[in-house]
Amino acid sequence: MKKIFLVIVVLSIISCNNDGIKEIEQSIVESDESSDETYYGNKISSDSISEYINVIQEVAEIGRTSAKLEGTIIETCAKKGCWMRVVSEADTLMVRFKDYGFFVPKEGVEGKSTIIEGEIFFDTLTVAQLQHYAEDAGKTEQEIDAIIDSELTLSFLAEGVIIQ
């Protein structure tokens, strides 16, 4: 009985480690060493970047639009890499990844340039969502408890990301 339990525990540990490796491998589409660019999700190009002011005007008029934007990463999810905050022009975008189909690095990309392609829209983040993101970011319990209001934000659902 003890041997069966031990085998189950060992197999569980091995399968967890393999899932983590597969997750990382599936997140990175390709790395271009000649240009120091790494692609995540759908491979996108770095040309035809939308003008931010035009994108925001379109979102204000119709609620959402497809776009390819450039910005600087200021924060990523420290637990899994399942979201990032990006400054584009003067606004901060909450970037999530379509169908959680890929993830970005959990650390080491802050301050790097990025190109994101997908859909941008205004979104209201609930207190529970904001607290969850704060927890993911490694905020203290006191900082998390201080979040008491929902927040209107620019959200971006990315299908592909380039980190330079």
Image (cartoon, rainbow, N blue to C red):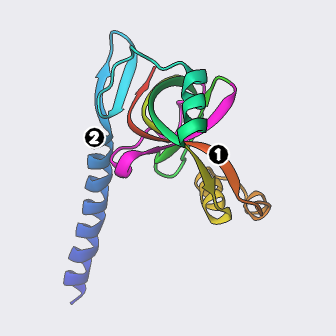
Q: Is residue 123 above or below residue 85?
A: below
> Where is residue 119 drawn, in percent x and y?
44, 38
Q: What amino acid is found at the position of numbered circle 2 in the picture?
A: Glu
Mark 2 touches mark 1? (CB < 8 Å):
no
Q: Is residue 85 visible?
A: no
Residue at 67% x, 31% y: name it: 91
Q: Is residue 117 left or right of residue 155?
A: left
Residue at 77% x, 57% y: name it: 143
Q: What amino acid is found at the position of numbered circle 1 in the picture?
A: Thr
The residue at which mark 2 appears reads as 25
Q: Is residue 152 above or below residue 10?
A: above
Give the CA distance from mark 2 to mark 1: 31 Å
Numbered label attached to residue 53: none
Residue at 65% x, 23% y: name it: 89
Judge by depth and name the residue closer to the eye, 39 or 94. 94
Circle 1 Cα neighbour tier, 10 Å, few/some/many (<14 / 14–19 / ≥20): some
Judge by depth and name the residue closer to the eye, 86 or 63. 63
- Magenta region: 90-112
Instruction: Between label 2 and label 1, give the one nearer the viewer.
Output: 1
Q: Is residue 162 visible?
A: yes
> Where is residue 131 drawn, in percent x and y?
66, 61
Residue at 23% x, 76% y: name it: 8
> Where is residue 65 drawn, in percent x and y?
47, 36
Circle 2 Cα neighbour tier, 10 Å, few/some/many (<14 / 14–19 / ≥20): few
Where disc 2 sits, the SS reads helix
Which quadrant would the N terminus be assigned to in this image? bottom left
The residue at which mark 1 appears reads as 153
Whether 93 is among the magenta residues is: yes
Where disc 1 sits, the SS reads strand
Q: Is residue 102 left or right of residue 10?
A: right
Residue farthest bottom in this picture: 1
Q: Quadrant of residue 159?
A: top left
